[in-house]
Image (tube, rainbow, N blue to C red):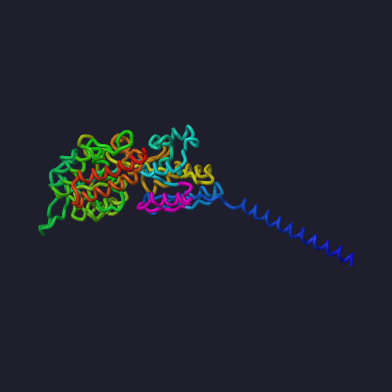
Amino acid sequence: MYNFRKILVFVLIMIMIAISLVGCGSTNLSKNTGKDEKDKLTVWLPPIGENDKVVWEPILKEFEEENNVKVDLEIIPWEGYPEKYATAVAAGEGPDVGYMYAEMFPQFIKMGAVEDLTPYLTDKDYENYIYIENCKMLGGIYGLAIEAANPAVLYYNKDILKELGEEVPKTWEDFRRIAKKATKDTDGDGKIDQWGFAQGWGANFFGDLNWNWYGFLWQAGGELYNDDLKTVRFNDKAGLEAAQFLYDLKFVDKVIPDNAMAQTNKEMLQTTFGPGKAAFAIWLSSGASEILDKSFPNLNYGFITSLKNKDMGTFASVDQLTLMSAAKNKKLAFKLMKHMLSAKSMTKFHKYHPRAPISKDEPYQGDPRFKEIIENDKGIYRPLVVAPHGVEVYEYLWKQLQRMMAGEVKPKEALDEAARYANDLLAQDQK
């Protein structure tokens, strides 16, 4: 019995040791598997062009293979874009590498959601990135330009101007005169079928301020914010002049199509200007190659960056890739940013979506017709100043301008209400 007990105890001990070893083996196996698992990075981008995912996937695949990492790309629609970020960041579910435009930055910098890239940048980076100065904001560098020098331009129909005996407009007065002459019934059915200015006011979000408002405000000599960024000034004399000019085009001169409140500027380019039914339209310069040349090859058109009133000016974004503060491997995420913005990667991307280069070592692959404009008109096209509450301020301003162009309110009432809302928001930050 004693020997049996000794044997039993020995067997039980051996079983326990075996179980322990198996457990240790399992633990070690799990650890090894963990080591073999790839790091994962998530990238959020808006649709910069058409079929972006197809263009980016091989570029990201290169990075995956070189760095043993998995990169997930999500393309997020422009509408509701900042809200998507705000919700995700609050829930700790945002991307590692993101894409932001000027209006978004203050909110997310204040939240501590984006990293200052200053410690990551080298002297070579400062020398190579063309738009690095535009990336400096609120005491740091919170992004690197990925989309730039795609200004809003005023398109004109050469055949309509020739038929009217007019030259390309230079001033607001020229533009208004030609637009009025161009607006007419060409087939004699008693209805207007050719318009002066195919401008759309139906966008659901404030992106169309980029071409419908900023340029005209700057041309009038105005600005959006005061220099201290504590109050807005778009409702001053210059702002009112710009708003009144737009209001009069619709309600006095009646040169804007009747369906203006139902279409965006891009849609107006496609449905009215492209088919030759308008003397003028306004949208991104990339619309020339991506829309007009492809869909309307027989359209005889030209473009200018800006009309002149007291000044000249048109909008051109400097949208940026950002390193999100929640990224677990910031070094790797920044390396991914550099890969996406490299001359090799952007050359591939711009082959599909022609744009001006964002770095000095990238060749120019943009529309050759815009090369001279991009190089020589840098004082005319400009981005927005990064200012507090940009998203909320511009969204509310857009809604008030839409009310104005719908005939619900007059220009002064629209601008004063938008300024009141903006200044109330800004005042809260100063308490």
Q: Nearer the viewer, residue 185 or 9?
A: 9
Residue 211, image x, y percentages: 27, 45
Which corner quadrant of the image does residue 145 belong to? top left
> Left or right: where does residue 148 sit relative to residue 63?
left
**Residue 411 position by quadrant:** top left
In the foreground, 300 or 307: 307
Q: Is residue 319 above or below residue 408?
A: above
Across and down, in percent, residue 143 comes to 43, 40
Q: Which residues are magenta?
A: 73-97
Asked whether 117 falls inside the magenta stretch, the response is no
Residue 370, horizontal then vertical, whole percent:
30, 41
The N terminus, quarter of image: bottom right
Image quarter of the C terminus? top left
Asked if residue 353 is positioned above or below residue 241 in the image, the reply reads below
Question: Between 374 and 301, which is closer to the camera in this rendering?
Answer: 374
Query: Which of these two is toward me, 265 or 206?
Result: 206
Q: Is residue 302 visible?
A: no
Determine if residue 36 is in view: yes
Q: Is residue 87 magenta?
A: yes
- Residue at 33% x, 46% y is 392
Left or right position of 295 against 164: right
Left or right for 112, reference 280:
right
Residue 238 position within the rendered picture, expressed as x and y whole percent measured from the top left: 21, 37
Specify the farthest residue to the front. Answer: 431
**With 417 as the anchor, is 181 left or right in this view?**
left
Looking at the image, residue 398 lies above or below residue 120: below
